[in-house]
Structures are given as C-alpha cells and as structure tokens.
C-alpha cells in the first residue's frame, strides 16, 4: 500500500491543492496500513469509495502511465468543485462530511462505541439510545494541552448530563485502531507538548459488555482496579499551515515509534525544519494520529522526532575529491 507514493506525477504541479492532496494520500495510506484487511476492502467499501475521490486515490496506482490522464482530470474536477479559491488544507480534506460519512465512520476509526446508554433525569434503569448525528465528527479529539493527552482522552468516556432535559448519557470507548487528535496549545502556564511527550499514550478504557446474568442486558465496565490501559503510539503528524500559500507538512512513524524516511521527492510537504512544541512557533495546530500498539511494553522507542537520511556514499566521495582538488589548487 505504501510502496507507491505521489513522488513524481503530481508534486511537480506545485500548486497548493495538489501538494496538500498528495500529503493527504500519503497519510491515509499509512493509516490504512494499521487497519485490519476486513475494514479496507469489501463490496460496500468499494461502492463507498466510488463516491469519494480522495478514497479512490488511496488505492490508485500512482505510477501507472495508463491512468495518469484520468487521475489529472479527476484532480482538476475536485479542485474546481471543492477548492476554487485554492484554500484546501489537510484539515479541510480530513474533517469534512464526505470523510465523516465514509472512512471515519468505519469501526477502526470510531473513538466512541456505537451503543450509547441513557436514562431520564430521575430514572434508575439505563437503556440503549440512538447515537447523536455528530458522534463521528466528535471522534476527532480536540486538545489544548491543559493536561496530559492520555488523561484528556480517557476523561471523554464518562457520564454526561443534558443541560436542558437533565437526561444522563454514557459514551464508552470503542478500542479504535486509529485515534485522531487536533492539538493546538492554548493552555496558560504550561509548556507545549513535544514529540517526546506525545510519542506514546495510554488510554484508560470504559467499555460496554453483556451482563453475565442476562445476555440481553448491557453493562458498563471500568478498567479493573483502574489500572488497565490501552497503549497507542504516534504514527502520523500533520503540521497545519498557518499561511494562505503555505503547504501543510507531514511526518510518519512506525507503530513502534521509528521515524519513517520518505522519498526526497516528497520534500515539498514533508520537511525537517519543524518540530512539535517549537517555542518559536507558538499557537501552531497539529493533527496527530495514533495507532493501537501491542499490549506489551515497547522497547527502543525512537527519541528523535524525524528520520535522518543516510548520506549517499558517491556524493560523499565526490565532495571529498572536490575538497582535495580545491586545496591542491590553492597551495
């Protein structure tokens, strides 16, 4: 899935739409690689993707010369319809009704369990109630850095009370394969989180299961002794653009935390000059994507936020020879 990336065909077009669109394809392919195959391909998913061009590009053969014309035409049509002013960003591509009704609505991306429990103000018995329309949209965790990200996410699975009716509702953890987060640091008196702070989080789950005494009844579970945690590791970061003509920037990691070195052809929307929590870049917004990691502790998590490319041996030798010649000619 990640073997072919939009390295040559479209990045040379250079406009903001194609740069951000290509970056979105790279991120979505990487996220899909962490999802079980059953949720990547089925008859219903195929029909769904035919209606959403960006999802079609996730599976497109970007190196196929036979389809390049069709891909360019489709990109142009999307640009005319969705981005006539040239203002598209990864956030707008990802957080749109088209994505809420398709990819993000699939089980591996749903933060909240589809079963919601509710009861009236003075009621004693919990009943299953219909999920509200924005539950998929709300799977995007919005965090301002006020407390730890893991604690913030864990606090979302709790009892809430409707302000007007007094009805109570309980939303539970869905053990998603992917958690998506919008992070913009606005918390006062606290330093912005860095990659080292964010590379691994541990979520305290609140789940729903069947009652042992009555299989027709659902009960909610808290972590045993409040010690159970579900481990997630940071697998993708989007540095959201703060200027009209600036492309978003992306960075990818493996599920065990190793930065992934991307082809140099993607440098127009990758870059190595930025870091999460940069004191010289206050107020920057980031999209963070976490993948559920193996339950056992992960050893050897990478401490660096980016991948450093190994020097090309031929270029090093050439540079050394040039240096020797220059020294010789100046003697």
Image: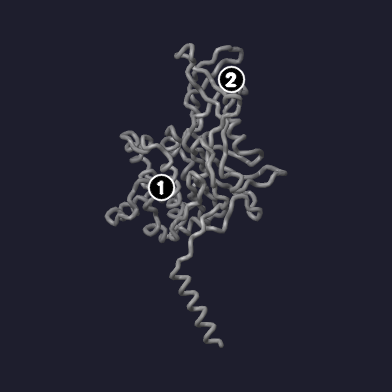
* Snapshot quadrant of residue 229: top right
- Where does the image place residue 269, in percent across and percent down from the top left? 48, 56
Q: Secondary structure at mark 2?
A: strand
Image quarter hosting the C terminus: bottom right
> Furthest residue to the right?
189
- Where does the image place residue 107, in percent across and percent down from the top left? 43, 32
Please tell me which residue lies in front, 232 or 28: 232
Count every numbered label the image shows and give the total: 2
- Mark 1 vs mark 2, CA separation in Å: 42 Å
Residue at left 51%, top 53%?
Answer: 249
Between disc 1 and disc 2, whose residue precedes? 1
- Where does the image place residue 157, in percent across and percent down from the top left? 57, 28
Please tell me which residue lies in front, 139 or 107: 107
Mark 1 or 2: in front is 2
Residue at left 54%, top 15%?
Answer: 126
> Furthest residue to the left?
66
Q: For mark 2, does the 10 Å Cα neighbourhood hold few (<14), some (14 to 19), or many (20 or more) residues? A: some
- Where does the image place residue 203, in percent across and percent down from the top left? 56, 34
Q: For mark 1, does the 10 Å Cα neighbourhood hold few (<14), some (14 to 19), or many (20 or more) residues? A: few
Q: Is residue 74 left or right of residue 139?
A: left
Residue designated by label 2: 168
- Please, is residue 287 above or below residue 68 in the view? above
- Please, is residue 276 above or below residue 179 in the view? below
- The colour mode here is one colour
Please tell me which residue lies in front, 73 or 252: 252
- Please, is residue 73 above or below residue 33 in the view? below
Contact check, label 1 and label 2, Cβ < 8 Å: no
Residue designated by label 1: 81
């Amino acid at each position: 899935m990640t073997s072919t990336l939009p390295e040559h065909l479209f990045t040379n077009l250079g406009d903001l739409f194609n740069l951000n669109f290509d970056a979105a394809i790279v991120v979505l392919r990487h996220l899909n690689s962490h999802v079980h195959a059953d949720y990547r391909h089925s008859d219903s998913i195929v029909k769904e993707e035919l209606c959403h061009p960006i999802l079609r590009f996730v599976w497109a053969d970007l190196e196929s010369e036979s389809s390049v014309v069709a891909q360019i035409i489709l990109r142009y049509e999307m640009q005319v319809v969705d981005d006539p002013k040239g203002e598209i960003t990864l956030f707008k591509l990802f957080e749109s009704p088209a994505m809420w009704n398709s990819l993000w609505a699939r089980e591996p991306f749903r933060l909240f369990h589809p079963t919601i429990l509710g009861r009236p103000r003075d009621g004693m018995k919990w009943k299953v109630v219909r999920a509200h329309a924005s539950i998929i949209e709300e799977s995007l965790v919005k965090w301002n850095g006020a407390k730890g990200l893991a604690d913030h996410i864990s606090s979302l699975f709790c009892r809430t009370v409707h302000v007007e009716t007094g009805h109570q509702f309980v939303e539970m953890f869905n053990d998603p394969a992917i958690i998506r987060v919008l992070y913009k640091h606005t918390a006062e008196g606290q330093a912005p989180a860095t990659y080292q702070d964010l590379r691994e989080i541990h979520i305290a789950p609140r789940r729903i299961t069947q009652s042992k005494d009555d299989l027709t009844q659902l009960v909610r579970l808290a972590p045993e002794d409040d010690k159970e945690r579900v481990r997630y590791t940071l697998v993708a970061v989007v540095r959201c653009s703060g200027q009209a003509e600036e492309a978003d920037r992306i960075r990818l990691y493996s599920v065990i935390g190793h930065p992934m070195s991307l082809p140099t052809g993607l440098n127009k929307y990758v870059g190595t000059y930025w870091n999460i929590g940069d004191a010289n870049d206050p107020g920057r917004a980031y999209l963070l994507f976490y993948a559920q990691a193996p339950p056992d502790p992960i050893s050897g998590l990478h401490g660096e936020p980016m991948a450093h490319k190994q020097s090309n041996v031929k270029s090093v030798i050439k540079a050394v020879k040039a240096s020797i010649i220059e020294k010789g000619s100046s003697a």
